[in-house]
Image (cartoon, rainbow, N blue to C red):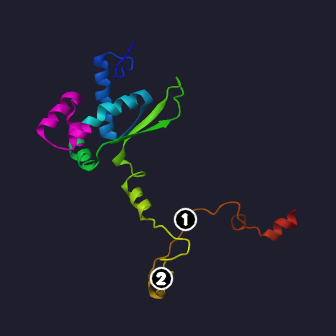
Amino acid sequence: MRHGDKIKNLSRTASHRAALMSNLTCQIIEHKRIVTTLAKAKALRVYFEPFVTRAKTDSMHNRRIVFSKLQDKEAINELFNVIGDKVADRPGGYTRIIKLPRRMGDASDMAMIELVDFNEIYGRDAEAAAAKKTRRSRRGAGTKKATTVPVETAAVEAAPEVTHTEAAPEHTPEATHETPTEEAAAE
């Protein structure tokens, strides 16, 4: 029985598990997103997030503690210089786990683990755009009417012409050089 056993062993010895977690941590620091099994991703989150918390305060002591576990100078520099600065104001939750379809070979549950602040799709820009939307009342109170602005013809004439080099689609009459009346007559 494993009462009170909080460590996910991943069917590995302690030394193998430490090497696995160290390698996965270095890869997520380097690539900002990795695909692995769901069990490894959940174990990696618990292992990796304390290092990011230490990276928020760049000191020799914190660098030595993290280096004792990871043994990779480039990963330590990236963690403390780039990642630590970017997550400085985040109180926790530095990673996101997204479940993926099962692996074809052995049907293992797969997942993508990524750093939250390094995703452009769900990043702060998307949050700012969502917060930028204003709430409208039913009566329309507070909304401004759109005004038309006259377009300067000199600016439009001075703009360079844009030419398309793509071929026209085949289903249009211009591409087949037929008119709709010729098609009707052919039937």
Do tag 1 and tag 2 residues touch (Cβ < 8 Å)?
A: no
Label 2 neighbourhood size at 10 Å, few (<14), some (14-19), many (20+)? Answer: few
For mark 1, what is the residue? 165
Q: Residue furthest top?
A: 1
Instruction: Name the residue type under label 2.
Output: Val
Q: Relative to the observer, which residue lies in front, 86 or 76?
A: 86
Image point (15%, 33%), residue name:
64
> Residue 9, how many percent across, how many down?
36, 20
The N terminus - image quarter: top left
Across and down, in percent, residue 94 comes to: 33, 42
Relative depth, front residue between 140 and 35: 140
- In this orientation, which residue lies closer to the viewer: 176 or 66? 66
Task: Give the Cα separation between the discs numbered 1 and 2.
Answer: 22 Å
Q: Secondary structure at mark 1?
A: loop
Of the two numbered discs 1 and 2 in the rendering, the one whose residue sits closer to the viewer: 2
Vertical placement of residue 172 versus 74, above or below: below
Per the rendered image, the range of residues in magenta is: 51-78
Circle number at residue 156: 2
Image quadrant for the C terminus? bottom right
Q: Check disc 2 and report its element: helix, strand or loop.
A: helix
The kind of residue on which mark 1 rests is: Thr
Chief SS of the magenta region: helix
Question: What is the count of numbered marks?
Answer: 2
